[in-house]
């Protein structure tokens, strides 16, 4: 899924208490629900198994997923929760929260079940997430709910922005859980990334960057690629081309000099790399003034 297409619609946002003994019998949702356990304990039953929810746990129920919920503590469960579509659809404002199993739904209701995109890449999110920093997530969720409930002008637009911040935090938490080396080495990787950002003219090797991070070349290559989605050397080239693009657009420096400034031995190597990364020739950014440049 293209993350640039994300346009969430927040349907319901509540900070709600469930009494001891309270039960939601098996149901199938049309949309997604994030349910955070702030106080008390509950049991969630899904097609894939049972989960005991304790304070700090976060459940993500997905469209079309069978599930039931039961309060198991002797005290009420405080469960701030949000129902949402990840992608806004024409019927998003009209769809309600489902409390039916799929067998009891009409064909029209079944047609309202959204496509589940979070179980596949790039998300691959499970039903239960045990957060590393539940307090941070909790505060963001409660802020979203408070603002949504106030009903101020542009509430849905504000909810969209707040939800995107919440969603990014959740994705980062999940990434650090499945790739713990990213979290433990984040400062080292950031140090190298900042060096590359500020020294685009330096033609550095993988070994030199790994030494800067204090990691083996193999481990550094794997961690950097997982953290930023590009290998260190591909990231270096991207930064160099980005800096070159700025100089082409905002200075009158010759392209040959710009190529030298960002560490290319020849204008031809520079032009080939520029077009491969940016999709157009360097002369594109000079408009009519340099149409014959490489």
Image: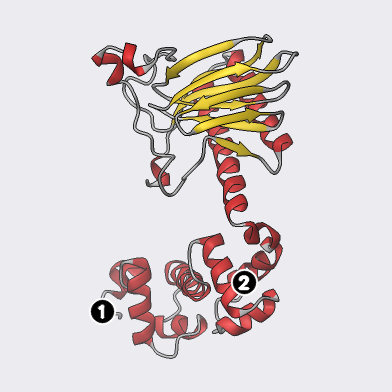
Taking the image as drawn, is residue 229 in sight? yes
Q: Farthest residue to the bottom: give it.
A: 265
Residues packed near mark 1 inside 10 Å, few (<14), some (14 to 19) or many (20 plus): few
Q: Residue 48, how many percent across, how many down?
A: 47, 34
Disc 1 vs disc 2: which is toward the camera? Answer: 2
Front residue of 212/201: it is 212
Mark 1–mark 2 CB contact (< 8 Å):
no
* Residue 198, label in figure: 2
Q: Residue 18, how many percent across, how many down?
A: 65, 12
Taking the image as drawn, is residue 154 in sight? no
Query: Is residue 51 depicted above or below 210 in this figure?
Result: above
Front residue of 40/15: it is 40
Query: Is residue 122 depicted above or below 166 in this figure?
Result: below
Q: Farthest residue to the front: give it.
A: 49
Q: Please, what secondary structure does the residue beneath circle 2 have?
A: helix
* Residue 18, label in figure: none
Q: Quadrant where the C terminus lies?
A: bottom left
C-alpha span from label 1 to label 2: 31 Å
User: Which picture quadrant has residue 170?
Assistant: top right
Residues packed near mark 2 inside 10 Å, few (<14), some (14 to 19) or many (20 plus): few
Q: Residue 67, how many percent across, how many down?
A: 48, 23
The residue that label 1 is drawn on is 292
Q: Please, what secondary structure does the residue beneath circle 1 have?
A: loop
Q: How many callouts does the rendering have?
A: 2
Image position of 244 (left or right of 23): left
Q: Residue 146, how many percent across, how many down?
A: 65, 19
User: Which picture quadrant has residue 200?
Assistant: bottom right
Query: Is residue 202 depicted above or below 170 in this figure?
Result: below
């Amino acid at each position: 899924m293209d993350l640039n297409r994300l346009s969430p619609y927040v349907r319901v946002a509540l900070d709600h208490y469930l009494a001891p003994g309270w039960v939601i019998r098996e149901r199938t949702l049309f949309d997604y629900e994030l349910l955070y356990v702030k106080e008390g304990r509950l049991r969630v039953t899904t097609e894939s198994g049972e989960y005991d929810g304790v304070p700090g746990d976060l459940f993500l129920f997905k469209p079309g997923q069978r599930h039931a919920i039961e309060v198991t503590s002797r005290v009420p469960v405080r469960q701030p929760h949000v129902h949402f579509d990840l992608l806004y659809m024409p019927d998003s404002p009209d769809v309600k929260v489902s409390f039916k199993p799929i067998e009891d739904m009409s064909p029209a209701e079944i047609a309202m079940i959204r496509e589940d995109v979070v179980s596949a890449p790039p998300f691959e999110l499970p039903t239960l997430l045990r957060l590393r920093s539940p307090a941070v997530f909790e505060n963001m969720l409660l802020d979203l709910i408070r603002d949504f409930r106030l009903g101020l002008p542009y509430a849905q637009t504000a909810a969209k922005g707040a939800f995107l911040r919440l969603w990014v935090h959740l994705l980062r938490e999940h990434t650090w859980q499945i790739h713990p080396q990213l979290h433990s080495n984040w400062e080292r990787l950031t140090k190298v990334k900042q060096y590359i950002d500020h020294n685009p003219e330096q033609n550095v090797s993988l070994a030199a960057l790994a030494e800067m991070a204090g990691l083996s070349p193999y481990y550094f290559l794997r961690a950097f690629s997982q953290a930023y989605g590009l290998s260190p050397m591909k990231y270096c080239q991207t930064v160099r081309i980005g800096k070159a693009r700025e100089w082409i657009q905002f200075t009158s420096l010759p392209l040959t000099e710009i190529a030298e400034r960002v560490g290319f031995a020849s204008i031809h190597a520079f032009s080939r790399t520029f077009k491969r990364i940016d999709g157009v020739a360097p002369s594109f950014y000079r408009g009519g003034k340099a149409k014959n440049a490489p």
